[in-house]
Image (cartoon, rainbow, N blue to C red):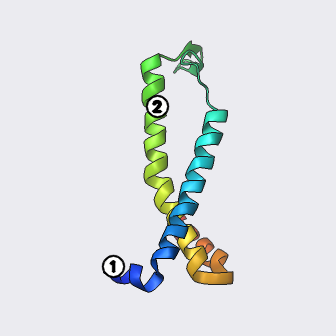
């Protein structure tokens, strides 16, 4: 079934969408590095609303979890939106809005 879909769409269009996803990932990586709190001692709010320095291990684990969730959610979503843009033509925004509002409910 997947091979039929690739044959119908065309290999070049699949690579075009993959290239768009790679571009979005690289821009996201650059922006997150630019805005990163690169020091593990950056304060975090504790339960009693006082500031305490964040432990280096917790900082690294939080950063890795953020990266993993971004990849698991962002890549399929970006691929879907770019694929809809390519397949739908001028009305791509309507389909993205429709599927986005349906998934928000």
Tell me if residue 39 can be seen: yes
Q: Residues within 10 Å of mark 2 (few under 14, many from 20)?
A: few
Residue closest to the eye, 31 or 14:
14
The disc at residue 93 is none
* Distance from the alpha carbon under mark 2 to that under mark 1: 38 Å
Q: Mark 2 vs mark 1: which is more N-terminal?
A: 1
Residue highlighted by disc 1: 3
Q: Percent position (x, y) of residue 67?
A: 48, 41
In the depicted structure, whether residue 61 falls above or below residue 105: above
The disc at residue 62 is 2
Residue closest to the eye, 90 or 50:
90
Q: SS class of the residue under badge 2?
A: helix
Residue occupying the point 47% across, 17% down? 56
In the depicted structure, whether residue 20 falls above or below residue 27: below
**Please, which residue is most extreme toward the left here?**
1
Residue occupying the point 54% across, 59% down? 21
In the depicted structure, whether residue 9 falls above or below residue 32: below
Query: Dividing the picture into quarters, in which one does residue 34 lie?
Result: top right
Query: Dividing the picture into quarters, in which one does residue 2 lie?
Result: bottom left
Q: Nearer the viewer, mark 2 or mark 1?
A: 1
Instruction: Count numbered badges in the picture.
Output: 2
Q: How crowded is mark 1: few (under 14 residues within 10 Å), some or many (20 or more)?
A: few
**Please, which residue is most extreme toward the front here?**
12
Q: Percent position (x, y) of residue 25?
A: 56, 51
Residue occupying the point 61% across, 26% down? 37
């Amino acid at each position: 079934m997947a091979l039929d879909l690739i044959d119908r769409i065309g290999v070049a269009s699949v690579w075009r969408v993959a290239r768009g996803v790679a571009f979005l990932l690289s821009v996201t990586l650059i922006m997150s590095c630019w805005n990163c709190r690169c020091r593990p001692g950056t304060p975090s709010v504790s339960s009693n609303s006082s500031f305490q320095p964040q432990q280096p291990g917790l900082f690294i684990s939080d950063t890795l979890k953020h990266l993993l969730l971004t990849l698991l959610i962002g890549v399929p979503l970006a691929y879907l939106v770019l694929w809809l843009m390519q397949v739908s033509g001028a009305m791509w925004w309507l389909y993205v809005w429709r599927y986005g509002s349906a998934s928000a409910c």
